[in-house]
Image (spheres, helix red, strand yellow):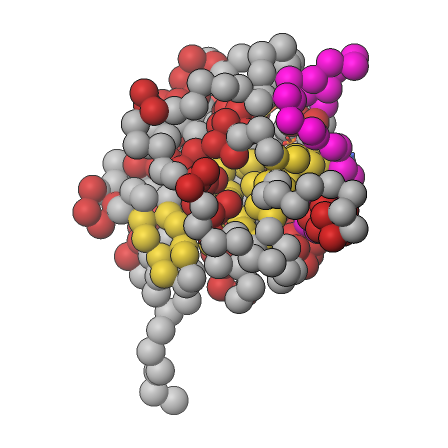
Amino acid sequence: MTQTSDLAFDRIAGVRKTPLEEFYASGHRTCQGCESALVMRQFAKASGPRTVVTGSTGCMYVANTSYMTTPWVVPWMHTQLGAAGPSAIGMAAGLRALMRKGRIAQERINVISFCGDLGGGDMGLSGISGALQSPYDLLIILYDNESAANTDIQATGLTTYGAQTTFTPPGKVHRVMQRRWKKNVAGMLAVGHPTCRYVATACSAYPPLDFLNKVRKALAVGGPTFIHTFDPCPKGWDYHPSYSHELGELGIKCGIFPLYEIVDGRVSYTYDPKKKGRIPVREYLEKQGRFAHLIDEDVAYIQRRVDAMWEEWEIPGVAPLKGGLRPA
Ligand SMILES: Cc1ncc(C[n+]2csc(CCOP(=O)(O)OP(=O)(O)O)c2C)c(N)n1
Ligand code: SF4
Ligand SMILES: [Mg+2]
């Protein structure tokens, strides 16, 4: 029952054309400057009132459901950490069954499931893979604040190399304790899921309206779809909350978080460093306390890896494969 383009999901042409209605309203308890809260607000605004939401445990569950209050105006359901994929399938299948039996009207209802980087990028990856191979219309949004933020900033598979977290404090023997390179979730899901026609990365801070329009595009393309967002987190990244937007923009412009969308296998860059250039990663790293212990050689290492993403990967920023047969 894959849906195709729908007028309700027209592109938002400018800030003044942005819908005024809020479906994730004020009154939640996320930190000041929380970009993940903006991700919630923006996707709900983009998808509109005929939307049901499910979300797995994390800041976006706990800080949004304190003491019998919630900012969700649309129906929302909490699900287990790691269960974003299965709960989306369950919701979509349930709605389909209710419509088939005539228990509710036949209409388009958007199913959106969100998860954090630990819940979706690590624990729930197999469930998301299953959902992206399913026959249902559903959108999974992985909001990536680069830590298990809700449980006090532990490293995940998506934490940037070198970052200080409560699992990876710099020490006297090892200055850099977080020595894994960030897991490439969007690229991995895009290349491995032929049923999924739309995969994108996004940042609620930059460029303006881009994330809202990617949500609309995902819903318009239909079938199982996936968006990975890049979310500065003042508490975990250790900076003043007023710099969240700036950090989002710097992260994109230095190329450490690639911004693109893939429709039916075709990649288009939202921020194309080959055309627009890249600022040094230092400009992004030095504004965050979580990188304060890094020395020049660490920053140079990160820069080299980011350079390789854009200059050596077969599909820059997306797939780290190197094409061409080598002589034996
Ligand atoms: C099965 C299970 N293990 C551990 C926890 C404890 N826990 C709750 S939220 C959370 C962190 C989730 O991290 P992430 O998905 O990145 O979301 P964030 O907190 O960063 O928003 C953990 C470990 C849990 N709720 N369930
Ligand atoms: S810890 Fe980070 S992700 Fe969690 S509510 Fe605060 S700013 Fe948002
Ligand atoms: Mg997280």
Number of numbered labels in the structure image: 0
Q: Residue at x 76, y 37 (%)?
A: 79
Q: Give the vertical position of 167 relative to 328 (above or below).
A: above
Residue 328 visible within the image: yes
Asked which quadrant contains residue 91, the reply is top right
Q: In the image shown, does 108 or 153 lie closer to the viewer?
A: 108
Residue nearest the viewer, comparing 314 with 287:
314
- Expressed as whole percent of the image width and height from the top left, the position of residue 328 reads 38, 89
Q: Residue 158, percent across and down?
A: 56, 43
**Residue 38 within the magenta-colored segment of the rendering:** no
User: Residue drawn at (45%, 38%), measured in percent from left and top?
Assistant: 8
Which residue reaches farthest bottom? 328
Q: Which residue is painted at 70% across and 30% down in the image?
A: 76
The relative height of residue 105 versus residue 44 in the rendered view (above or below) is below
Residue 29 in the image: state x and y as whole percent: 64, 13
Residue for point 59% across, 43% down: 108
Quadrant location, the N terminus: bottom right
> Left or right of 45: which side holds 128?
right
> Is residue 285 in sight in this rendering?
no
Q: Which residues are magenta?
A: 62-91
Whole-percent x, y for residue 94 in the image: 76, 47
Q: Is residue 22 left or right of residue 150?
A: left
Residue 75 located within the stretch drawn in magenta = yes
Q: Nearer the viewer, residue 91 or 259?
A: 91
